[in-house]
Amino acid sequence: MDTLALILSIIGSLNWGLIGIFQFDLVAWLFGGQDAIISRIIYTLVGLAGLWCITLLFRKGQHADRE
């Protein structure tokens, strides 16, 4: 789950980078616009992945304590 969340977060950050630098939304372009259901699903999954990645910050310290 952690790897999937990191991959989705990377996809989201690359998309935001494209939006910021070139004003180009790759997800919307690939899947038919920002209002397309598949685009909204991807945006939602990326957002949930970002929330999941927050937990990695706290779990990282716990892994070091166990080793």
Image (cartoon, rainbow, N blue to C red):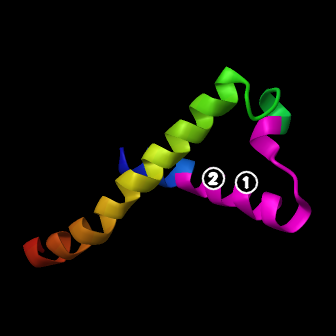
Residue 22 located within the stretch drawn in magenta: yes
Q: Which residues are magenta?
A: 9-28
Vertical relation: 22 (above or below) 32 = below
Label 1: state its secondary structure.
helix
Circle 1 Cα neighbour tier, 10 Å, few/some/many (<14 / 14–19 / ≥20): some
Q: Is 31 drawn above or below residue 29 in the view shown?
A: above
Dot 2, how many residues are within 10 Å of its Cα: few (below 14), some (14-19), or many (20+)?
A: many
Q: Quadrant of the C terminus?
A: bottom left
Q: Residue furthest left?
A: 66
Estimate the x, y position of residue 13 in percent, counting from the top left.
64, 60
Which residue is at a point 18% across and 77% down the rendered structure image? 64
Q: Say the numbered circle drawn on residue 58.
A: none
Mark pair 1, 2: CA separation = 5 Å
| Amino acid, disc 2 | Gly
Residue 17 in the image: above or below residue 67: above
Using the rendered view, name the quadrant where residue 1 is placed: top left
Q: Is residue 23 magenta?
A: yes
| Residue 63 vs residue 53, the one in the foreground | 53
Question: Residue 15: which numbered mark, if any?
Answer: 1
SS for dot 2: helix
- Residue designated by label 2: 12
Who's the residue at 54% across and 50% down the image? 7
Left-right relation of 47 to 66: right
Left or right of 2 on screen, residue 20: right
Residue 51, position in %: x, y? Answer: 39, 54
Q: Looking at numbered disc 1 in the image, what kind of residue is underneath it?
A: Asn
When asked about the image quadrant of residue 48, the answer is top left
- Most prominent secondary structure in the magenta stretch? helix
